[in-house]
Amino acid sequence: MSARDPAGTVLPPAAGDATPALAVAGLVKSYSGRRVLHGIDLEVRRGELVALLGANGSGKSTALRCVAGLTEPDSGTIRLDGADPALLRGARLARARSGAAMVFQQIHLVPRRTALDNVCSGALARLGPAALHPVFFPRALREEAMACLDRVGMADKALERAGRLSGGQQQRVAIARALCQRPTVLLADEPVSALDPSAAEQVMGLLADLAANRGLAVAAVLHQPGLALRHADRVVGLVNGGIAWSEPADRVGHDAVDALYAPEPIEEPA
Ligand SMILES: Nc1ncnc2c1ncn2[C@@H]1O[C@H](COP(=O)(O)OP(=O)(O)OP(=O)(O)O)[C@@H](O)[C@H]1O
């Protein structure tokens, strides 16, 4: 079990804690008989931001969705904090699953509700369906949600309706909502694709900060190699459902990035 601060955020591990927050091995997934993931291996440690790059259809989102439990893999193992959700049932399964929170390009806040109420709903997995309705939000949850908003620099917008916030602000609120789930692993699927360059830099800086200073393990699918190289600790390149390379960000060369997006050679007729 990871150590947490009073607001529930994971703290950096004690020296010597070798269990990766996320360990994926041999992940295989097919849709309608067509294999789209060919045995993915991926580890993300607490304190680390890993960016996944690859062309459209290379399997990045499918890999994240398998980790989040939104898609069932054909085979392979996924361990969250050392536990394999596929082997768990009931409350233990729910606890393991809530260890991985996800944010998306489409932010999916409830626009009529305040930022604070949206963040409180991140506790749904812990508190049950009652957490869906603001009338039932306990005071301690509201305080925790405020701490999460503060962490993403949005405390001053807590009582603003979510629909009135800018795209970048909404994504920050969505990240705060994910934090309110008290995850160890934060999965971000194209978190900045809908944002302007300045907001994208800020949100990526926030994700890097949550990894470096809050001990979260962050895996982010990105379509902007520059953002990946600037903010990630490690970059993983996917090609056709397989991992082509995995390197510390400061060792990734332009050629390796360009190769991910090279068009498939057109086969000449015989
Ligand atoms: N629900 C689904 N049903 C059928 N095929 C799917 C489904 N989801 C994804 N695929 C297919 O799986 C392959 C990998 O898709 P995936 O969305 O994981 O790729 P991606 O790298 O995230 O792409 P993009 O950058 O375009 O979002 C694609 O060929 C896609 O068409």
Image: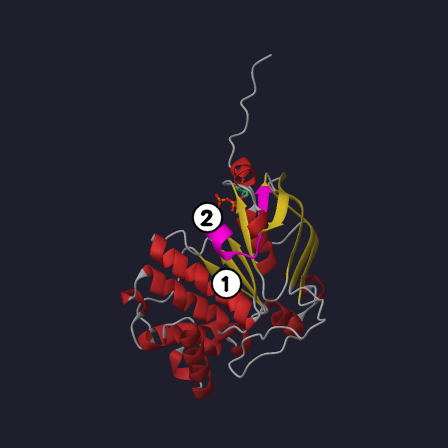
Q: Measured from the top left, where is residue 187 in percent x and y?
A: 53, 60
The amino acid sitting under disc 1 is Ala
Q: Is residue 18 above or below residue 200?
A: below
Name the side, left or right, on which 164 lies relative to 256. left
* Element class at badge 2: helix
| Pointer 1 residue | 208
Which quadrant holds residue 126?
A: bottom right
Q: Quadrant of the N terminus?
A: bottom right
Residue 88 vs residue 263, the one in the foreground: 263
Earlier-in-chain disc, 1 versus 2:
1
The residue that label 2 is drawn on is 226
Q: Is residue 157 visible?
A: yes
In the orientation shown, which residue stands out farthest toward the bottom? 139
The region drawn magenta spans 224-238
Residue in the picture at 64% in, 73% down: 13
Inspect the magenta stretch and tell me whether residue 227 lies in it.
yes
Nearer-the-camera pick, 193 or 131:
193
Q: Say which element carries label 1.
A: helix
Q: Quadrant of the C terminus?
A: top right
Q: Residue at x 42, y 66 (%)?
A: 174
